[in-house]
Image: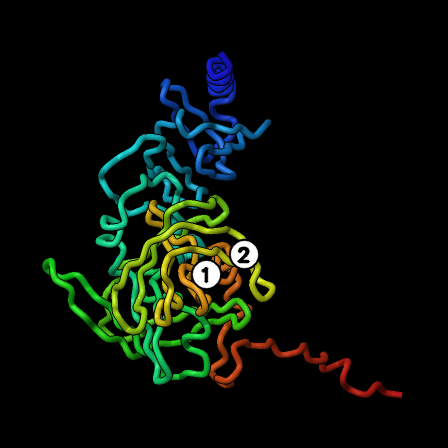
């Protein structure tokens, strides 16, 4: 009875306010539709601002979503919602700040094996004279993420990428790598491959760690101890473990030296964390930086820009404002 009343209210809203708010369109399974702006997406519901109120729409009632021109996703991009599917499709998402893609939240869950075959090419090995770690591409032009501690104090960096060609993996090393930004305290770094003739790279979308719950299955791809393309699986032990004044995702997924900087995926193929450490005196005690912190770092990357004139400093400081010439000149008497 309550569900029938809710559907009646949705139909009434769709009939009374079909064109008041331009933007996204949510089509319901009973052929009704609502237009507005999607302001939040959770596992079980969408939140649609229709101008006069914000509606909570159960995903079970959503047939598809058509993104508007001002939406983060591409215009008129139709995305399935609600139903289950055995077919694995890479998450469709819109560009955010022209640097990374944001998962829509509608992707069906799939097995780790299926996702690894789709996403593995976007995960790389980061090598320096002092050691190695992992990383992953967020933009097809060669922008990638790793941990700050992987490249700390280093100026020579190479990236090992496994390209899929004719059903085979082809290993290629890229050595013209720039540090664009890094956050020492957040343990994040943004790199870019500048090698001439570099192809377009496969990328992974960023998910939402706010909707991750204890017990959710996750998996990591990386290079522990230099063993490339190693996959480990586990669950989320807790979503907000305080360590050293920061909050981390704790996971039973095996994290070892060499995994640092690699992605932690959910079963929808989206990055929910950046693996960065483990407790050495126990097993199944791995930690990852929540993807929200990564998204903040990327959106404010100018504040963390790397200064080539001072390679020992991870930050670039703006020059102080100078006095105006007329203010600096002595006044006439």
Residue 241: which numbered mark, if any?
A: 2
Asked if residue 114 can be seen in this view, the reply is: yes
Q: Residue at x 54, y 76 (%)?
A: 315
Q: Between disc 2 and disc 1, whose residue precedes? A: 2
On screen, 95 above or below 35? Answer: below
The quadrant in which residue 129 appears is bottom left
Q: Position of residue 79 (x, y in %)?
A: 33, 36
- Residue farthest to the top, as pictured: 1
Relative to 181, is 258 on the left or the right?
A: left
Of 257 and 321, the residue lying toward us? 257
**Residues at circles 2 and 1 in contact by the CB criterion of under 8 Å:** yes
Mark 1 lies on a secondary structure that is strand
Q: Residue at x 31, y 65 (%)?
A: 222
Asked if residue 15 can be seen in this view, the reply is: no
Q: Quadrant of the C terminus?
A: bottom right
Relative to 31, is 292 on the left or the right?
A: right
On screen, 305 above or below 103? Answer: below
Q: Position of residue 281 (x, y in %)?
A: 45, 68
Q: Which residue is mark 1?
A: 287
Q: Position of residue 289 (x, y in %)?
A: 48, 60
Tell me how far mark 2 sits from mark 1, CA to CA: 9 Å
Q: Residue at x 50, y 62 (%)?
A: 297
Q: Position of residue 326 (x, y in %)?
A: 75, 81
On screen, 266 above or below 221? Answer: above
């Amino acid at each position: 009875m309550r569900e029938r009343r809710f559907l009646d209210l949705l139909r009434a809203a769709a009939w009374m306010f079909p064109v008041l708010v331009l933007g996204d369109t949510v089509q319901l399974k009973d052929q009704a539709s609502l237009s507005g702006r999607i302001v939040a997406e959770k596992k079980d519901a969408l939140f649609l601002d229709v101008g006069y109120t914000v509606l909570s729409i159960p995903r079970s009632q959503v047939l598809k979503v058509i993104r508007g021109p001002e939406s983060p996703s591409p215009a008129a991009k139709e995305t399935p919602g609600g139903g289950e599917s055995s077919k694995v499709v890479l998450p469709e998402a819109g560009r955010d700040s022209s640097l990374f893609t944001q998962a829509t939240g509608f992707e069906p869950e799939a097995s780790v094996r299926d996702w690894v075959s789709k996403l593995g090419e976007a995960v790389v090995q980061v090598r320096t004279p002092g050691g190695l770690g992992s990383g992953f591409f967020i933009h097809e032009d060669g922008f990638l993420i790793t941990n700050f501690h992987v490249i700390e104090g280093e100026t020579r960096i190479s990236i090992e990428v496994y390209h899929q060609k004719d059903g085979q993996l082809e290993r290629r090393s890229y050595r013209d790598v720039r540090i664009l930004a890094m956050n020492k305290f957040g343990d994040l770094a943004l790199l870019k491959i500048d090698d001439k003739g570099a192809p377009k790279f496969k990328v992974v979308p960023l998910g939402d760690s706010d909707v991750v719950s204890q017990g959710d299955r996750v998996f990591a791809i990386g290079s522990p101890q230099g063993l490339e393309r190693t996959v480990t699986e586990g669950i989320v032990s807790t979503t907000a473990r305080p360590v050293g004044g920061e909050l981390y995702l704790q996971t039973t997924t095996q994290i070892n030296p060499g995994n640092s900087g690699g992605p932690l995926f959910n079963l929808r193929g989206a990055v929910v964390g950046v693996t960065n450490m483990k407790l050495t005196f126990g097993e199944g005690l791995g930690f990852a930086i929540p993807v929200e912190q990564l998204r903040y770092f990327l959106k404010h990357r100018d504040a963390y820009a790397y200064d080539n004139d001072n390679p020992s400093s991870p930050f670039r400081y703006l020059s102080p404002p100078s006095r105006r010439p007329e203010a600096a000149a002595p006044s006439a008497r």
